[in-house]
């Protein structure tokens, strides 16, 4: 009799464990198939009106591509870290590009007035570039090596240490 | 001469017709794609900006002559198979399709076995050997019961 009850309890626990695992997993943590592959090309207009930024023109440099929106709180939080890493590494052949997505132009302009990044920012009005990069939220940051291959992807606000770590590895590697 | 005009019109209009996907064709693909900023909502059903942009991209790629499969493959390439609302019917994802059917089948077999055992036990309880009571003993028990019954 007891043996049966124990077996029944163990069997009943199996779906509970599976459900618990499923509910604990973060539905927003999605593995990207893009890491290790060549980054999708883009040519997007700059906010300051100084023409376009073309990824193809940046081959041979380590490129940081940061997707952001003015309504995104973590984007505001990471702005200082991005600027700091950019200032530290801009003479090491590193290029940083901010890509504004899912936004209104006026609000995005206001955001740039407040955070004052010194690296170029472009706007992806159609969303084609953000979809090409498999973006599902903001902020997301991609670090590209000198061959234009995506070497790191970070979802959510990135810290200066994390970003400097990725950039430093690629700059130091000299590849 | 008129047939030549007709052929020319068909030649020009043919690709143009293919180049303008209907809303239904766009929805057909969009309904199979997961809205990436929502939870459990398709690109066709979501009112979000991101889903709108994804629908536009579906329309553009269909208009450029891609098949629905090619459009879906484009999204899978960027987002992984996660972007498809139905898991693929191959590899590890087959479990998602097979497991429910397997569990259902297994449960039915178990239920059948248990039912058969119960009916067999019930039949055994009412078995003929139990009717086989010695008439003399039965009469003695009945007499004893009658004697003890309160007046």
Image: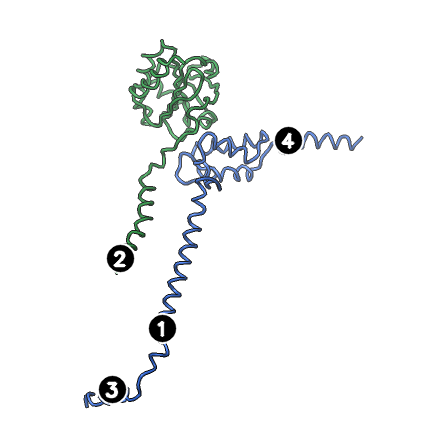
Which of the two residues, B123 or B86, is positioned nearer the viewer here?
Answer: B123
Chain to which mark 1 belongs = B
Q: Mark 4 or 1 closer to N-term?
A: 4
Task: Check residue A3 in the rendering and tell me which mark sits there, or answer none.
Answer: 2
Horizontal and vertical percent position of residue A75: 33, 24
Q: Mark 3 or 1 closer to N-term?
A: 1
Say which residue label 1 marks. B124
Say which residue label 4 marks. B16
Pointers 4 and 2 within a single chain: no
Mark in the foreground, 4 or 2: 2
Q: CA distance from mark 1 to mark 2?
A: 25 Å
Count of numbered tags: 4
Q: Quadrant of the C terminus of chain A?
A: top left
> Which chain shows up in green?
A
- SS assignment at label 1: helix
Q: Is residue B136 above or below residue A145?
A: below
Q: Quadrant of residue A166?
A: top left
Chain to which mark 2 belongs = A
Asked whether the residues under the numbered discs 4 and 1 touch, taking CB atoms below 8 Å apart as contact, a structural biologist would say: no
In the picture, measured across the screen, residue A76 lies left or right of residue A53, that is left
Say which residue label 3 marks. B141
Q: CA distance from mark 3 to mark 1?
A: 24 Å
Q: Colour of chain B?
A: blue
Horizontal and vertical percent position of residue B49: 43, 32
Q: Quadrant of the N terminus of chain A?
A: bottom left
Which class describes the residues within 10 Å of circle 2: few (<14), some (14-19), or many (20+)? Answer: few
Which class describes the residues within 10 Å of circle 4: few (<14), some (14-19), or many (20+)? Answer: few
Q: CA distance from mark 3 to mark 2?
A: 40 Å
- SS assignment at label 2: helix
**Which residue is rendered at x = 64% and y = 31% of the image?**
B16
């Amino acid at each position: 009799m007891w043996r049966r009850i124990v077996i029944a309890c163990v069997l009943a626990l199996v779906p509970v464990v599976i459900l618990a695992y499923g509910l604990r997993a973060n539905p927003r943590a999605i593995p990207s198939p893009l890491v290790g592959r060549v980054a999708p090309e883009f040519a997007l207009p700059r906010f300051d009106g100084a023409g376009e930024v073309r990824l193809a023109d940046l081959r041979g440099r380590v490129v940081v591509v940061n997707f952001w929106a003015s309504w995104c709180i973590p984007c505001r939080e990471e702005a200082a870290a991005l600027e700091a890493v950019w200032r530290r590494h801009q003479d090491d052949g590193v290029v940083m590009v901010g890509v504004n997505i899912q936004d209104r132009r006026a609000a995005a302009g206001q955001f740039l007035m407040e955070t004052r990044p010194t690296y170029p920012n472009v706007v992806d009005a159609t969303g084609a570039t953000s979809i090409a990069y498999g973006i599902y939220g903001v902020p997301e940051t991609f670090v590209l090596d000198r061959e234009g291959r995506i070497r790191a992807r970070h979802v959510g606000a990135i810290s200066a240490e994390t970003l400097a770590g990725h950039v430093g590895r690629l700059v130091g590697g000299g590849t | 001469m008129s047939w030549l005009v007709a052929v020319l019109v068909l030649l020009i209009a043919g690709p143009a017709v293919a180049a303008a996907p209907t809303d239904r064709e766009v929805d057909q693909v969009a309904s199979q794609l997961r809205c990436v900023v929502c939870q459990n909502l398709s690109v066709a059903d979501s009112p979000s900006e991101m889903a709108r942009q994804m629908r536009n991209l579906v329309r553009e790629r269909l208009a450029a002559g891609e098949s629905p499969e090619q459009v879906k493959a484009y999204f899978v390439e960027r987002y992984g198979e996660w972007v498809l609302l139905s898991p693929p019917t191959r590899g590890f994802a087959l479990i998602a399709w097979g497991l429910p059917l397997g569990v259902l089948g297994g449960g039915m077999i178990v239920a059948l076995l248990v039912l058969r055992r119960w009916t067999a036990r019930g039949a055994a309880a009412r078995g003929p050997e139990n009717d086989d009571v010695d008439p003399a003993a039965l009469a003695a028990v009945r007499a004893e019961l009658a004697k003890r019954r309160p007046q």
